Image (cartoon, rainbow, N blue to C red):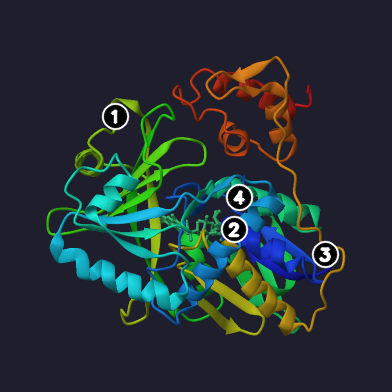
Amino acid sequence: MEAYDVAVIGGGILGCFAARNVRRWNLSVALLEAAEDVCTGITRANSAVVYAGYDNKPGSRKAEMTVRGNGNYESLCRELEVPFCRCGSLLVTYDGASLPKLQKKLNEGLKNGVPGLRLLTGAEAQAMEPMLRPGVAGALYAPSTGTVNPWLLGIAAFENAVENGAVAYRNTAVTDIEKTDTGYLLKTNRGTIPCRTVINCAGLFADRVQELLFPRSTRLHWDGAEYLVLDEAAPKPRMVLFHQASSCGKGITAVPCVEGNLLISGVRKEIETPFATTPEGLGELHRAAKALLPEVDLTQIIRSFAAVRPNPYREGGQSLHDFCIENPGPGFYSLIGIKTPGLTCADELGRYVAQEAAAFWNAQPNPDFNPHRHAIPKSDDSEILCQCQGITRSEILEAIRRGASTVDGVKRRVGSGMGPCQGSRCAFAIETILEGYRNGTL
Ligand SMILES: Cc1cc2nc3c(=O)[nH]c(=O)nc-3n(C[C@H](O)[C@H](O)[C@H](O)COP(=O)(O)OP(=O)(O)OC[C@H]3O[C@@H](n4cnc5c(N)ncnc54)[C@H](O)[C@@H]3O)c2cc1C
């Protein structure tokens, strides 16, 4: 097999954007994903917020990429035909003692160049967001905050990368890496793939992938978050709400998602089983949600889930707060422990590593790169398979044609199974279609 110029390990949102951006250059690229589909790791379970950029230390890579990434979201989502909503956000506190924290975030946000940021009185915040429990002491308003569907965006970047010539290997886990005179040999469960450059985007396992060849430098410690999803019919705030953690309790985030659901999340420091919810965590979320939004209707919860977050530490214990992009060997780049705001910065990070690879090989821009990808069109086919979301058989067939190989894969592409019945009415029909595809009768 001829060596690829670049091999991207990991098809989460970062790997998909890395591969797409590599194709902006005259470089061949392969994307290797261990799972049977892309965007099934951290990208599948997060808060879906496009951050404004006031949370990051001025001068840091995170601050710079967040503000720039946020500013480019409309054009990015237009190119990839993915819905994006710039709904704004309020960081609210009920605790007068926390107001200096809001002032600090305002000052840092202004230094970072976050547009339109301002402090509100409690009354102003409540007028802006009437669902808030009375008694707000103050709030930080960020009009540039937005929301996006993370896995849909990642899949769109993946499709666009493939349309531009990226070669995808799914069900392909990198198990060993060897250095050669001209690059690297990636040993996988499906054979060896030679390449000249590696971009390691292996998410929760990025540290271990790098250690397949290089000495340990950074370790990922996992913690998590738990989530409640409310039906789109439930009352929801107009904008993203962050409840500043205080002596009175943990902070939560409430996100009116682009699909119309309300997503409520809280952080968990300890996780016993990755991606598993806990009765205590969900109980805390229920209480905290009611404390922030008394009108929230918890009988409208249609799903709960847990997420896992990779926190990077240097060998020796020092925690890393900025994005960690390592270059342990010639032409080998690792994105290690990219947690929040990795979704906001996915394209920025992808551009950055692609540019590094291009500079390494003195590559020229690819004149044929086409940034546009078309969404799966809504069809007026009368055969509706997902009754809750109104998803037709034609849309489901198109999702399968584009690479969905499981009921979940179809869901991530067209939104089937995301309504109140959570797929109990359509999963069997979709599985039957998938079966037909697998055995060639469709
Ligand atoms: C709880 C939580 C909430 C968050 N909320 C936000 C938010 O609101 N806004 C925001 O901007 N950011 C947010 N983030 C950050 C954002 O979600 C992540 O930065 C981003 O999804 C990371 O994507 P990834 O591609 O690195 O990881 P993943 O999506 O996990 O992708 C890594 C992929 O690598 C594959 N892989 C692993 N090992 C191998 C191997 N050996 N060979 C081949 N493939 C391999 C995995 O199967 C996986 O598919 C949040 C993160 C967390 C955890």
Q: Nearer the viewer, mark 1 or mark 3?
A: 1
* Nearest to the observer: residue 22 or residue 209: 22
Callout 2–callout 4 Cβ contact below 8 Å: no
> Which quarter of the figure is the C terminus placed in?
top right
In terms of sequence position, does the residue under pointer 4 or pointer 3 come before the other? 3
Please give the residue where the numbered disc 2 appears in the rendered image: 73
* Distance from the alpha carbon under mark 4 to that under mark 1: 29 Å
Residue 116 percent location from the top left of the image? 44, 64
**Most distant residue in the right direction:** 368
Sequence order check, earlier mark of 2 and 3: 3
For disc 4, the neighbor class at 10 Å (few under 14, some 14 to 19, many from 20) is many
Q: Position of residue 182 (x, y in %)?
A: 76, 82
Tell me if 89 is positioned left or right of 250 in this view: right
Q: 69 or 431, which is in the foreground?
A: 69
Eye-nearest disc, 2 or 4: 2
Is 112 or 210 nearer to us in this picture? 112
Mark nearest the camera among 4 and 1 is 1
Query: At 46% across and 56% down in the image, what residue appears?
Result: 145
| First reached walking from the N terminus: tag 2 or tag 4 | 2
Instruction: Identify the amino acid type marked 1.
Output: Asp
Residue 258 is marked as none
Q: Which residue is mark 4?
A: 153
Q: CA distance from mark 2 to mark 4?
A: 11 Å
Residue position for label 1: 297
Which amino acid, by three-letter code, is at mark 4? Leu
Residues at discs 4 and 1 in contact (Cβ within 8 Å): no
The first of marks 2 and 1 along the sequence is: 2
How many residues crowd mark 1 within 10 Å: few (<14), some (14–19), many (20+)?
some
- Separation (CA) of disc 2 from disc 1: 31 Å
For disc 3, the marked residue is: 1
Which amino acid, mark 3?
Met
Q: Quadrant of the N terminus?
A: bottom right
